Image (spheres, rainbow, N blue to C red):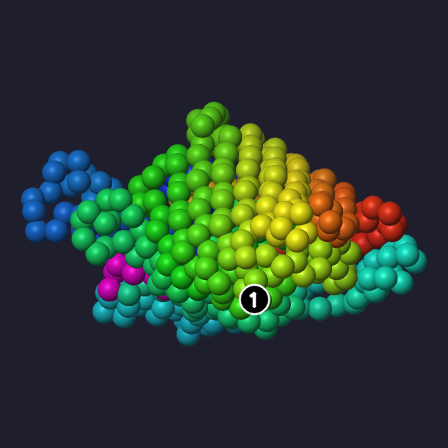
Amino acid sequence: MWAWACTTPREGSAQEDRTGREEASSDAAPRIRTHAELSREIDFRRRDLEELDVDIGDRRMTPAELDRRRALTLEIRELEAERARLEQAEAVAANDDSAGARWSRFRAAFRDITSWDLRDGIFRFRIGVRTQLDATYGVEADAIENVRGSIDNGLRLRRARVFAKGRLLRAMDFWVEFDVGEDAGLKHAYVDGARLNNWVSDHFRWRIGKFQEPFSIGRMTSSNYAGFLERGLPADTFAPGRNVGFMLRHPENNDRLTWSASLTTDGGSTADNPNNSELTLTGRVTGLPLLFDDGNGFVHVGLSVSNRRPTDDDIQYQARPEARSAPVYADTGRIASDRARLLGVELAVVRGSYWLQSEWIRAAVDAPAAGDPQFTGGYLEVGRFLTGEQRAYDRAEGTFDRATPNVVYRGGNPFRSNARLGAVEVTARYSTVDLTDASISGGTMRDVTLGLNWYLNSESRMMLNYVHSRLHGAGDADIVLLRFQYNP
């Protein structure tokens, strides 16, 4: 039995082969990989091997295909041997009665009961839990508090998600996820595949069920991999969330270009799924026009569009400071409308340990009685890994991915000069959203956020954010946020 991480729902995946998977398995890696990381690497190569076998079918292999198959088989054997050595070392430490050793033994036992591989890959299944625990302290101007309410200070479960994902018949991936945290509800429930026939597999992948609409790098990048506790103002205010429908997207062999188009209907209203629609056509295209530093550095550009028919023939946009426990500050109120159109433009750059991410989003509302208002917002984020890591990017999805520290934190005082610190990242963001236009006076907000992220390993992260938010004409709010995140 071995752990398997579904690779099509990218939130649980490691950095892909096309963005440095070979680098992650290099003999020159400056650290010992964890059991979960080794399992993910094995899963990637097994999936590649399966798909190669499906492509070959009953015909004779070409020399290149034969070489590729031999190389994948050898890599799998080497990774399995490395994982076996790690498990042996863990077994030797089984008599260690320290708290850390007991926790490691619990995790190993938990892996055994949550991951299944039946009939040599015919059915693969993994269940798990990931959590984000937040602490908040904030103060706001009296004018804001009197009208909008006060910030809810304290400790809370921001997200606590139970998920099940896997693969059916070596051809279709599935993912089901339920959140019992701040925005409780069913998040994902879909089947994803490509192997209907050779023509389909060469041109498309398909997805059916409840899934994230393809709009905005800020919305589509998992909160587990974002540089801040919460998304920037325009992505949180305008970008759609998860709805029910059908999606077609690029084949997996795309290297520098992604495209996705979905037809969806209302999947339920939550704070992370604004402005729902009876019928929606949404699409996103991304590309990597520039690559440098041997492909490790890049420039990402993207364009998203969405044509929406609001439920109940009205629509409402709301914006809160970049803290989930803060009340809504800017609000358009209900606007009678039978159509809304979203346009998003995105840019991201990664070079060495530095990264940049930016978006601009416009919402055009067909509402003659209100003067057909248009609302806009944008943000600019920058960050740097002080310990030398590079922000991971998933080329198959056009989003950012799981960060893996060069050195895993092993406990003890992290401030010692020779400590195995993990990864440390500093971030900053400026974002704004304007919900005032025509006869609608929803307000204008601007946020400045400073962040510090500490990656203990590839699964655990501590985050500290300071948010200074200003609601035009009302005053300021200052909020400090702290998060512990566990994402196996």
In the image shown, does 308 or 252 lie closer to the viewer? Answer: 308
In the image shown, does 416 or 359 lie closer to the viewer? Answer: 359
Determine which residue is flagged by label 1: 312
Tell me the element at label 1: helix
Horizontally, residue 132 falls left or right of residue 107, namely right
Question: What is the three-letter code of the residue carrying label 1?
Answer: Asp
Q: Position of residue 74 (x, y in %)?
A: 26, 46
Residue farthest front in this picture: 369
Instruction: Pick the quarter of the image with the N terminus.
Output: bottom left
The residue at the point 76 percent across, 51 percent down is: 441
| Residue 107 in view, yes or no | no
Residue 374 location, quadrant: top right
Q: Position of residue 97 (x, y in %)?
A: 59, 71
In the image shown, does 92 or 266 lie closer to the viewer? Answer: 266
Horizontally, residue 244 falls left or right of residue 430, namely left
Residue 170 magenta: yes
Q: Position of residue 195 (x, y in %)?
A: 23, 55
Horizontally, residue 238 falls left or right of residue 147, namely left
Residue 43 location, quadrant: bottom left
Q: In the rendered image of this protein, does residue 106 appear above or below residue 72?
A: below
Residue 347 location, quadrant: top right
Q: In the rendered image of this protein, does residue 44 appear above or below residue 314?
A: above
Residue farthest right in this picture: 142
Q: Position of residue 231 (x, y in %)?
A: 64, 50
| Residue 193 in view, yes or no | yes
The residue at the point 36 percent across, 68 percent down is: 125
The residue at the point 56 percent across, 66 percent down is: 312
Horizontally, residue 360 falls left or right of residue 478, namely left
Range of residues picked out in magenta: 169-174
Residue 98 magenta: no
Q: Residues within 10 Å of mark 1 (few under 14, many from 20)?
A: few
